Amino acid sequence: MEKSIVITQAQKELLLNHASKFSPNESCAILFGRVEGNKNIVEEVYLAENIDESPVNFTISNEELLKAYKIAEEKKLDIVGIFHSHPNSDSFPSSTDKKFMESNPVVWLISSNKDELKAYSLNGNIEQVSILNS
């Protein structure tokens, strides 16, 4: 069965607005929720800071990552996805993204400069993941 991520329209708009606010630099966020079978269900969006302040890279600080994991644990939620924007390119994982997808095996949501949102997971190869509205 194909993997999917379930996200509300309001959550999508929150992520796209976050991307727009930080353009021309990449923006990033952590997606909290739960996994049911092959569905990653987003229940909460944690907007993060890109400490690289770069149009081609993003880094979430260790302090912020620890804070996000603590919040997820307190809310009894899992980290089900990572979001970031590609302000100057298509919403497809870069070679850098692929490297980080290996160490963060969750669904990756990527927005492009055309407000296009796509999702991917790494399963040996990069596979596109269906985005379902909740």
Image: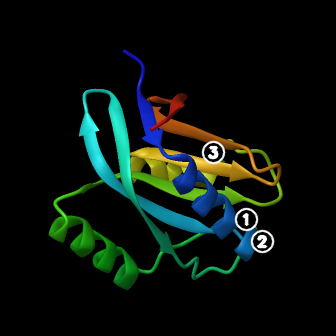
How far apart are the two marked residues, 3 and 1, measured between alpha carbons?
11 Å
Write down the residue under mark 3: 93
51 left or right of 105?
Answer: right
Q: Which amino acid type corresponds to the residue marked 2 in the rendered image?
A: Ser
Eye-nearest disc, 2 or 3: 2
Work out whether residue 15 or residue 110 is closer to the camera in this orientation and state it.
15
Give the image location of residue 61, x and y in percent: 44, 80
Q: Residue at x 35, y 39 (%)?
A: 40
Callout 3: few (<14), some (14-19), or many (20+) C-alpha neighbours within 10 Å?
A: many
Q: Residue at x 33, y 73 (%)?
A: 68
| Dots 1, 2 in contact, CB < 8 A | no
Q: Secondary structure at mark 3?
A: loop
Disc nearer the start of the sequence (1/2): 2
Q: Quadrant of the C terminus?
A: top left
Q: Are marks 2 and 3 in contact (CB under 8 Å)?
A: no
Amino acid type indicated by mark 3: Pro
Give the residue pinned by disc 1. 56
Q: Residues within 10 Å of mark 1 (few under 14, many from 20)?
A: some
Q: Is residue 12 left or right of residue 113?
A: left
Say which residue label 2 marks: 23
- Sequence-first disc among 3 and 1: 1
**C-alpha separation, residue under disc 1 versus residue under disc 2:** 11 Å
Local secondary structure at mark 2: loop
The residue lying at 56 percent from left, 66 percent from top is: 28
As drawn, 16 above or below 3: below
